[in-house]
Amino acid sequence: MQSDDGVPRERRHGGRATRTANRRGRREDAELRASEVRFRSLAHAVPAVLWTASTNGKLTFLNDRWYEYSGMNVRGMQGDTVHPDEREAAVARWMEGVRGESEFEFEARRVRHDGEARWFSTRGVPVRDSAGRVVSWCGTTTDIHELKLKQMALRASEERFRLATESLAAFLYDWDPLTNRVEWFGGLEEVLGFRLEEVQPDADWWAGRIHPDDLDSAHRVVRSALDGQAAGYSNVYRIMHRNGSYVSVADRSRILRDHAGVALRVLGGVSDITKRRRLESEHTALLEKEARAAAEGDARARDDVLGLVSHDLRNPLAAIQICASAVAQSIDLKSEKIQRMLASIQHSAESMDRLIRDLLDVASIEGGHLALELREEDPAAILLLAADMFVDAAADQGIDLRFRVVPDLPAIRTDGDRVLQALANLIGNALKFTQPGGQIALSVVQEAGSVRYIVADTGAGIPAEDVPHVFARFWQKRPAAGMRGTGLGLAIVRGIVEAHGGRVSLESSPGKGSRFSFTIPTQSGTSATV
């Protein structure tokens, strides 16, 4: 079929189709060139290195950042600028990546045109065709130098921390008290024998290994700090090692709280102090041993003094007393002067003898070997004997000395002479501090398992601040005129009473008098020498 101009219609239509196809092809080529221009413009504007590569590893495109960094126009492989120390590994990783099917990434130092080496991260992504086959690669090479240095510094710091904690036999923990989860750090293996990956990440695991005798106190310390507003806590306890033994640890922490004061995190450190505690124990034992040795030396020295006092002083004193008595019997005593001199000699000798006995008793009490001759005694008879000893002296001073005995008192197994000595010291002390017209009351009563002797007076009384000291040896309140003493009497009273297994007590008020008392057990198991 022909057109009006005689040209076959099929030819005319075919030429038109060809021209249309050509125009479409030119338009697509232009759009492709424009797209490539846009891609290159965008790629050159990106601050990182952009690249494309074939599946055999050859680079097909590099943006301007590459040339600015390398200072060269190379279409070689990506390893061209890699630091010599890492080139082999980097090239191998690059080739492994482009020959694979999935994304890849590796890090390496790259040498800049001025010689500085910086860390870069290279990441590749596969480009696939419509059938899913990898036909090329595109990716980035990004400067991570500052980040890498920080990571390396962090790892170095962590390594220094690990070495420090291991050398110190210590480790750290980060505990969340709300979830009870714990993260452990450092030398746990050096302290307890467990590697970090073997330890359960919860506080119950740790609590379950604390020594049963220490668990309650350790828990109280932690709970008190968490419930209060403490900035942290410090704890010392024993915890079970992997081998079943217990090690002593010091646990110190800081508590982080929210605005309401609720504990959110506990950051702490645990150090092994087993060796330190052992050294402290050994040091304490050594000090105790030295103290015992010193005490034994003092005891030996005291015994030597006792021997000196008992022999070198008491024997001459006894001779003086005997001679004074012989003189009194052999001369004319009508002379009042001679009588006064002999009485003075006798009185001085008796006072010296009493002082020596007191010193011997105090030394024996302190040495723990006060001699007691135990036998069954009537407690009332001892009290009556003591009253008879002082009734005349009390009358001479104008003091009313009274006594009261409860009937049917049980017998006591005691050294009657020593109990009488204690009563005599208390009564003598009462006479010293009671004014004429005053009163001293003596009594003995029964208590559970003991009898109590009481010496009460209406004297000056003792201030409260002095009461704790009155039974100390050689202690005296500043004495009034004519009231000097050795300060041994009350110390001897306490020593005698405690040697019997009893207790001494004092109640006193200034201006109202004093009430001394002591107990003697009714069934004494005390040996003859204490």
Image: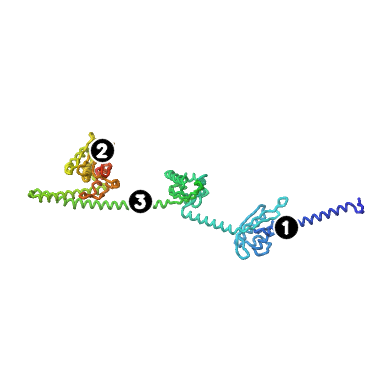
Q: Quadrant of residue 391?
A: top left
- Location of the C terminus by quadrant is top left
Q: Percent from the top left, x then y, of residue 43? A: 68, 58
Q: Percent from the top left, x then y, of residue 524? A: 26, 39
Q: How many marks?
A: 3
Secondary structure of the residue carrying tag 2 is strand
Question: For the residue carrying disc 3, how many other residues have a C-alpha within 10 Å: few (<14), some (14-19), or many (20+)?
Answer: few
Secondary structure of the residue carrying tag 3 is helix
Instruction: Identify which residue, 220 or 93, lies in the foreground.
Output: 220
Q: Quadrant of residue 7?
A: bottom right
Q: Percent from the top left, x then y, of residue 73? A: 68, 64
The disc placed on residue 451 is 2
- The residue carrying mark 3 is 285
Marked residue nearer the N-terminal end (2 or 3):
3
Asked if residue 75 shows in the view, the reply is yes
Instruction: Identify which residue, 510 or 286, lies in the foreground.
Output: 510
Marked residue nearer the N-terminal end (2 or 1):
1
Q: Nearer the viewer, mark 2 or mark 3?
A: 2
Q: According to the image, what is the colour scheme of the structure?
A: rainbow
- Residue at 62% across, 65% down: 114
Q: Amino acid at mark 2?
A: Val
- The residue carrying mark 1 is 36
Secondary structure of the residue carrying tag 1 is helix
